[in-house]
């Protein structure tokens, strides 16, 4: 009997020992091994490889710039993402300058491009001549554009070739509305403007080309926009002289004032802007600037000088 009890004790002891050894092995496996933390960190960084170049987090659930703290207390800081652009435009930009004046953001344009050439009493283009002319029939009774001078056509129908088609389109549309259209003056050379300036001064007993209010009624040579070839004086028939008060309510002038921007043209010398343009109100003088700029200028009642200031 004693032997039997001893055997039972030995077996019990073996079972206890085996249980203890198993427990030890299980604990050792669960405990952190040397290098585990480094692997965890490397796993975290490996996740950043797939991050887009713009810095937005690959994981949408992760708060930008937040610290990730694993259970062991090792802190992983993800790079701070650039904040979204502020809705308020920077003051030293076209949009910022427009906002300061209560205007909407202006179109993105290159003001050094040809259609924004500024010509006025303070900006002479000296003896500039457009590279290539287009010649339009003065009465827009034909729809062709001649690209070489025709002796059968008045030189007054000449414009920079780049505005010939939009000018023809605008005038043709006015004609289609039943309006009479006449191009009274388009390109004028430096020499022709010098002669005009002398004649108008002599006729009015002045020498500086300005009226009693100090606004130009004729420009010195080099300072007339007509020399750029980018504009046209448009009325319903030939007039020996043109006065704003007589022309402003003509159906053609009203139509042009409402639709010119659709063809890339602006009313260049608006009423109320005389002190900025330096030129009296001219309801017949239309200048090409392209449709984006023309729509912004006409919708916001600006003159070209005001518009260009937004970009400088
Ligand atoms: Zn004019």
Image: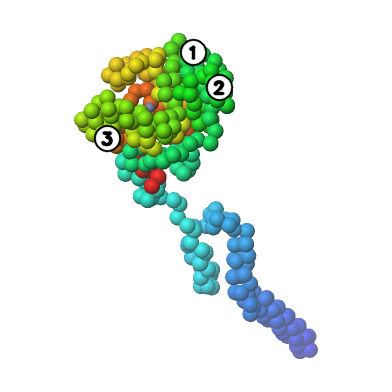
Instruction: Answer above or below: position of 59 versus 193.
Output: below
Left or right placement of residue 139 versus residue 98 in this view: right
Ligand 1's quadrant is: top left
Q: Which residue is tagged 3? A: 208
> Mark 2 Cα within 10 Å, few/some/many (few <14, many 20+)?
few
- The residue located at (54%, 15%) in the rendering is 142
Instruction: Answer above or below: position of 304 versus 75.
Output: above
Residue mark closest to the camera, 3 vs 1: 3
Q: Which residue is tagged 2? A: 150
Distance from the alpha carbon under mark 2 to that under mark 3: 35 Å
Q: Earlier in the sequence, mark 1 or mark 2?
A: 2
Q: Secondary structure at mark 2?
A: loop
Q: Is residue 250 visible?
A: yes
Instruction: Determine whether the beta carbon of the residue marked 1 sits less than 8 angstroms from the nearest atom of ligand 1.
Output: no
Q: Which residue is tagged 1? A: 176
Residue at the extreme top of the image, as rendered: 178
Q: Secondary structure at mark 1?
A: helix
The one of 33 and 139 positioned closer to us in this rendering: 139
Distance from the alpha carbon under mark 1 to that under mark 2: 26 Å
The one of 28 and 251 positioned closer to us in this rendering: 251
């Amino acid at each position: 009997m004693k032997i039997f009890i001893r055997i039972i004790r030995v077996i019990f002891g073996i079972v206890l020992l085996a249980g203890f050894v198993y427990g030890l092995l299980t604990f050792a496996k669960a405990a952190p091994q040397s290098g585990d933390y480094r692997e965890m960190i490397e796993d975290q960084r490996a996740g950043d490889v797939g991050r887009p170049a713009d810095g937005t987090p690959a994981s949408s659930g992760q708060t930008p710039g937040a610290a990730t703290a694993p259970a062991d207390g090792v802190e992983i800081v993800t790079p701070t993402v650039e904040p979204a652009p502020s809705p308020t435009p920077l003051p030293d930009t076209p949009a910022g300058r427009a906002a300061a004046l209560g205007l909407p953001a202006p179109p993105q344009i290159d003001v050094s491009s040809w259609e924004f050439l500024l010509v006025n009493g303070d900006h002479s283009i000296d003896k500039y001549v457009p590279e290539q002319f287009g010649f339009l029939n003065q009465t827009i009774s034909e729809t062709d554009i001649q690209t070489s001078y025709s002796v059968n056509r008045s030189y007054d129908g000449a414009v920079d070739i780049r505005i010939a088609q939009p000018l023809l389109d605008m005038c043709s549309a006015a004609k289609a509305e039943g309006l009479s259209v006449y191009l009274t003056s388009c390109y004028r050379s430096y020499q022709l403007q010098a002669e005009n300036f002398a004649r108008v001064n002599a006729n009015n007993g002045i020498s500086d080309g300005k009226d009693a209010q100090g606004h130009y009624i004729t420009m010195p040579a080099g300072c007339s926009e007509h020399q750029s070839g980018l504009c046209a004086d448009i009325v319903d028939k030939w007039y020996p002289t043109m006065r704003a008060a007589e022309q402003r309510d003509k159906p053609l002038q009203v139509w042009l004032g409402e639709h010119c921007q659709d063809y890339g043209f602006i009313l260049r010398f608006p009423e109320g802007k005389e002190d900025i343009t330096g030129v009296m109100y001219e309801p017949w003088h239309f200048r090409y600037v392209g449709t984006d700029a023309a729509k912004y200028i006409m919708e916001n009642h600006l003159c070209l000088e005001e518009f260009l200031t937004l970009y400088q």
